[in-house]
Image (cartoon, grey):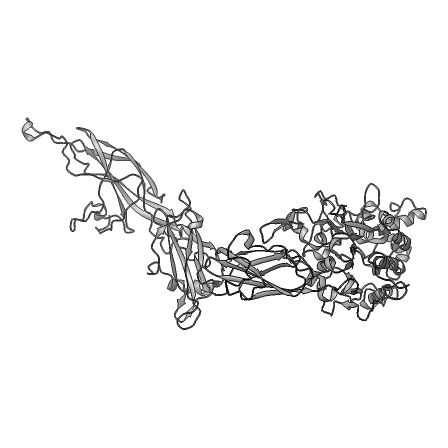
Amino acid sequence: MSSPRRTAFRPVPIVCLCFLCAAGAAWLAGCTDDDLTGTPVPNVLPDTKLVSTPPTQVPGGYTVRFAWTGYDPDGQVSRFEWKLCPIGRDGIGVQDTMSMDPATGEVLHPWCCATGQDTVLMVLADQRPEPDAPPADADLFTQVHTFLVRAVDDRGEADPTPAFVSFTASTIAPSIWVDRPVLLSYAEAQPMPPSPTFGYTGLDPDFESGDPTRVRHLLKRAWYQDHYIRTRYEFNYLWPQLISENDSLWSDWAPYPTHPEDRQLHFHDLDWQDEFGRGPTYILALQCADTAGAVSVDWTYGRSVVNFFVSQGITPLLTMQERYLGQRRATGIQSSTTFDIAQGQPLQFSWTATATDYNGTIVSYRWGWDVVDPDDPDDPQWALPPGNMPEHRQTPLRTFSSGTHTLTIEARDDTGQLTRFVWVLAVVPVPDYSVQMPLLLVDDVPDRSSNAWLAADGVSPLDNDIFRDAFWREMLTGHGGVQGFDPLQDVVDLEDEEFGLRRLVNYRAAIWTSRYAQNNFVWNNFKPFNDFSMRYIWLASYQRFAGNLFLVGSKVLLQFLPGGSWLMPVVFDTDEGGPGSIGGPPGYIGYAGLGTVELPDGTIVNAGTLLYPYQDLGVSILDVMDPRGHFIDGCTGTPWSARCRRLSACSGTKALVRDSAFALAHPTFAAGVAESIFTDDRIDWRDQDPAHHDALDTWIWGDTEFYDRNISGRTTPWVPQDCDGQPCLEPMFLSLSRYDWVADLHAAAGDPDWPGSRFTWRELQDICGGRTLSPITNRSLTSGLPVGFLSHKLVADKPSRRADVVWGFDPYRFDHAAVRGAIQWVLGEHFGLVMQP
């Protein structure tokens, strides 16, 4: 036993109440010595034994149970008394168990009464681990205690040798971390508004509720010697100089809140400049304690310690959307955007804001058309006072006939931070149909430097701009061309020219030639962002209010989808999938479907219904003959193997076939357009050699799109869109696959056994792809699919009341003489332009 020492008394939390026992109680009340006769018999003192104790050789928990028994040889035990004495690291001393300090009279460890023979105590375990403790014990707090118990007999005499046991109580230190705002930086100081709010969560792993019992915080400037700490590296090196548990700036200990929404710390009007004009950084440190008195010991940067600075530019994130103008996000008060809109274009905006990045709460919005002074709360153009009702987060439907108009939208948080955004909308007057120019040719094919599609001479790159421009001049000028079309002023090459709605509305019709390519005009201006942040496709505004569109090109509509490896076919009106969803066999990583998005007004919609092919053209399903870079739904093999694909050598479109129903409904089309239009011999010159097409190899044209057909077996339900009682899509051309064309040639030549006479089924799958041919009919699945159509989706508001036209193929690739008749039918007979004799 060590030498006597003084141990300060600390209150011990216990389950049962400790009643102090009165010393020297008479063992038999009402008797005096005069009443007694005879020789007194000495009282034999009772004896006490412990029968149940916590472990003594290893640390135990901080909830401990004791049981005991007592015996009085010449009477009976009337009660028991116990005491608990915390012991220091140097062992137990005499004074550790004293009930009273003889020098001062101070109560040290009083005896407590016990009417039973057991008790459960919750004891302290608040001594920190030794500095050299192994990592496994780094968070283990301990405390040595001695428990003493003695029996008291019916004469009031106590056992002079109490039973006792020394044991070590232990607990795992609790932990605490800042979890709001959710985007805390783990590398450097992060900006916060002048009145920031932080939320926190604590954990006590060995307490039944899992919660700590107390919490406190320290907020101070992160100043060290001559500068402010701004990085994790600096903090990890200097934290002992920045954080001390004895720092006077620590708050008082407070109960740990039960409800998460109450676990927040609010600070008001923090300085963004110090007295010397410098921008200070701050540290916020948190500490919690558990029931046993152990405190958290973690000072991890970005977890229990937050490093931040005050920025006056931290304001709510405002997200706004208009169905046709797209989506915008903004912070601060200086943001704006300018759009040209069509005369009479309907406008309806919705928006929402969030301050979760800095743990704020949005409390109010306001908006107004043509607000003169946004800083004047009484400006008469504000639509309504600030508030947070549905009418504060959306505008009613509105149109403008002329001029420039502004929509100002504001969002304010609970600390007064403001975000303001201004939409500047310039109305583009739509000329009267009678004075519009007839036709504009828009060249959005990046082909200036193309060296592809070498001609039979092995020199001429037929995919080059020189040859393509000559094709369109041939189609639009001269015999049968468009009267009034001037190739010197009515052609826009988007590889080097600025272009927009303001120029386009001056034309009754526009041919837009394009193809899927990175950094073409559609990609840079109309393609939605991958998070489905919609962009203003003013092309649809032109279609709706100004004129007719003739959109042509390979994979021409696929380029209006966000980037990604979409599962084919793309079904627009479904909530399936979204980025990262499971849509294929094991190992497939891609986009199983377009999923859903939440609009700023809180409405959840299928994301595909917001996209241009669905919303403005009426397409319900989109697919490609050879969907390179995409997985075809329904395959159970390796996603990118030939047997899980359709390959262009067989699936590509060799000929355009008039749709019989379309020809019946449009007699002039049937009269002026060939029943089948095959590829141009000057471009597809290799197929003139029977040996080449018989081998079914090296045929590159598989980028033709088809619409509203499902040839993959995908089970996603879909229905064609309805436009005023008729299908929105009116098929115009159907495809004839190269494979079926070759098969027909063999049949006509008297070889009915082809392809069995030339290929094994396994070889055929490797050449054609395992998803191209029907094993029942031995014909291609890509024949008979709609590859060109009339779209009735936007007819109602058009000046011409005529449907737009989409060809999902490159007309330049087909026989020029034959396709000329189809192009001129669209422009003359259908759009109503005046054609040359």
Residue 227 pos. (x, y %): 42, 70
Between 162 and 569, the residue placed more toward the observer is 569
| Picture quadrant of residue 160 | top left
Residue 822 pos. (x, y %): 86, 57
Task: Left or right? Give the position of 602 relative to 725.
Answer: left
Between 322 and 75, the residue placed more toward the observer is 322
Q: Is residue 29 above or below residue 127?
A: above
Between 310 and 637, the residue placed more toward the observer is 310
Is residue 767 among the parts visible in the rendering? Answer: no
Q: Residue visible at 48% across and 58% down?
A: 413
Q: Residue visible at 15% across and 51% down?
A: 103
Quadrant location of the C terminus in the rendered image: bottom right
Q: Is residue 733 above or below residue 113?
A: below
Would residue 248 be counted in the magenta stretch? yes
Q: Which residues are magenta?
A: 245-252
Q: Is residue 402 above or below residue 98?
A: below
Task: Left or right? Give the position of 398 relative to 746.
Answer: left
Q: Residue furthest top?
A: 38
Would residue 198 be counted in the magenta stretch? no
Residue 382 pos. (x, y %): 54, 60
Is residue 253 among the parts visible in the rendering? Answer: yes
Residue 530 pos. (x, y %): 64, 57
Label tally: 0
